């Protein structure tokens, strides 16, 4: 065997091995799992409202009727094993009083009601910062696509990534907004809406849904029950405008006063940072004011907010290598 072959062959074997055994985190409680229990101190908030578009009990049977288990309110608040069923291809859109932001690592988690680690019903997850344009996490399903996973069939969590429903009841499947950071039209530091969309799970060409790599997503099908499809329990928030970024810069480097404020908000900072602009959001995450600072002449910014309605706002001060978010009360 020539020298190059002796080197290349083992490398090819290793690469082949990695591809064939590519695995994602295992079920809750196992080493390397990313599942987060509902009582984790990581969660600082939960969804505040939810609206649902139910899917059919069986998408291949138009007269099967729509699922009706639970109601949309069951998807708000802390995970409690009270769910709303989405049905085949159904969806739920959740909103949050304080917009979700991209902090270090996972930013939110979705809870389903699987009673074991292997009977899993899956859903795509999308986020939006304007309530109109939604962006989907790159879902991956490496489950075989030769045989339909049956009504009570099993799935392996290590073959599933970025799909809600990967973990059993009361354990959230987490998502990291960092993955969607550079999408035009999306502000990952002001996520106001999350949409959960049942994957259907049927592998027939007529009804199949695909993952981000073009694989058919195979999950239990048909599930012709009143509780068919993905059962949404809750969405827990790990980072929002209240805690993302605030840690990154100490309070005394940026001073904002007065707060509460009636007319002009003063922002003062010292020479340790170079402020490049600011964004002011209302409590729903709508951008109210935005300014870029090109030439930093002084270490003061004056923001006139006299015309704004009274209430709570979030001021995001953007500096050269980070940002800091403060809650502002307009009187
Ligand atoms: Ca993140
Ligand atoms: Ca619930």
Image (spheres, helix red, strand yellow):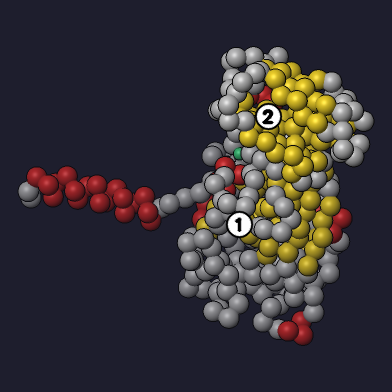
The C terminus: image quadrant:
top right
Which residue is label 1 attached to? 136
Ligand 1 image position (quadrant): top right
Mark 2, secondary structure of its residue: strand
Establish if 195 lies above or below 210: above
Q: Which residue does the image show at 69% across and 78% down from the upper left?
A: 59
User: Is 248 placed left or right of 243 in the picture?
Assistant: left
Q: Which residue does the image show at 54% across and 38% down from the upper left?
A: 31
Q: Which residue does the image show at 90% across and 28% down from the upper left?
A: 262
* Label 1 to label 2: alpha-carbon separation: 28 Å
Q: Position of residue 191 (x, y in %)?
A: 70, 46
Q: Which mark is residue 317?
A: 2
User: Is 35 placed left or right of 14 in the picture?
Assistant: right
Q: Position of residue 12 (x, y in %)?
A: 25, 51
User: Is 56 placed left or right of 34 in the picture?
Assistant: right
Q: Which residue does the image show at 29% across and 48% down from the upper left?
A: 14
The quadrant in which residue 108 appears is top right
Going from N to C along the chain, the mark reached first, 1 or 2, is: 1
Q: Is mark 2 within 8 Å of ligand 1?
A: no
């Amino acid at each position: 065997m020539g020298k190059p072959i002796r080197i290349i062959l083992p490398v090819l074997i290793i690469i082949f091995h990695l591809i064939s055994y590519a695995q994602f985190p295992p079920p809750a409680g196992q080493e390397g799992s990313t599942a987060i229990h509902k009582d984790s101190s990581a969660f600082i908030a939960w969804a505040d409202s939810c609206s649902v578009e139910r899917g059919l009990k069986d998408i291949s049977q138009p007269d099967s009727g729509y699922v009706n288990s639970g109601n949309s309110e069951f998807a708000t608040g802390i995970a409690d094993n009270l769910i709303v069923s989405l049905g085949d291809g159904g969806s739920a859109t959740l909103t949050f009083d304080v917009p979700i932001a991209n902090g270090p690592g996972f930013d939110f988690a979705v809870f389903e009601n699987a009673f074991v680690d292997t009977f899993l019903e899956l859903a795509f997850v999308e986020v939006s910062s304007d309530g109109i344009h939604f962006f989907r996490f790159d879902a991956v399903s490496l489950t075989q696509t030769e045989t339909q996973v049956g009504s009570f069939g099993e799935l392996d969590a290590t073959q599933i990534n970025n799909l809600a429903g990967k973990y059993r009841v009361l354990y959230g499947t987490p998502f990291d907004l960092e993955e969607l950071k550079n999408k035009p039209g999306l502000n990952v530091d002001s996520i106001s809406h999350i949409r959960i969309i049942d994957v259907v799970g049927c592998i027939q060409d007529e009804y199949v849904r695909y993952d981000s790599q073009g694989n058919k997503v195979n999950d239990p099908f048909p599930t012709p029950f009143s509780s068919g499809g993905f059962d949404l329990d809750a969405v827990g928030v790990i980072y929002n405008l209240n805690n993302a970024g605030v840690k990154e810069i100490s309070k005394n480097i940026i001073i904002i006063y007065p707060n509460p404020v009636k007319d002009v908000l003063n922002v003062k900072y010292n020479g340790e940072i170079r402020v490049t602009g600011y964004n002011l959001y209302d409590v729903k995450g709508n951008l109210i004011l935005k300014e870029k600072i090109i030439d930093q002449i002084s270490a003061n910014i004056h923001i006139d907010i006299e015309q704004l309605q009274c209430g709570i706002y979030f001021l995001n001060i953007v500096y050269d290598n980070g940002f800091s978010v403060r809650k502002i009360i307009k009187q």
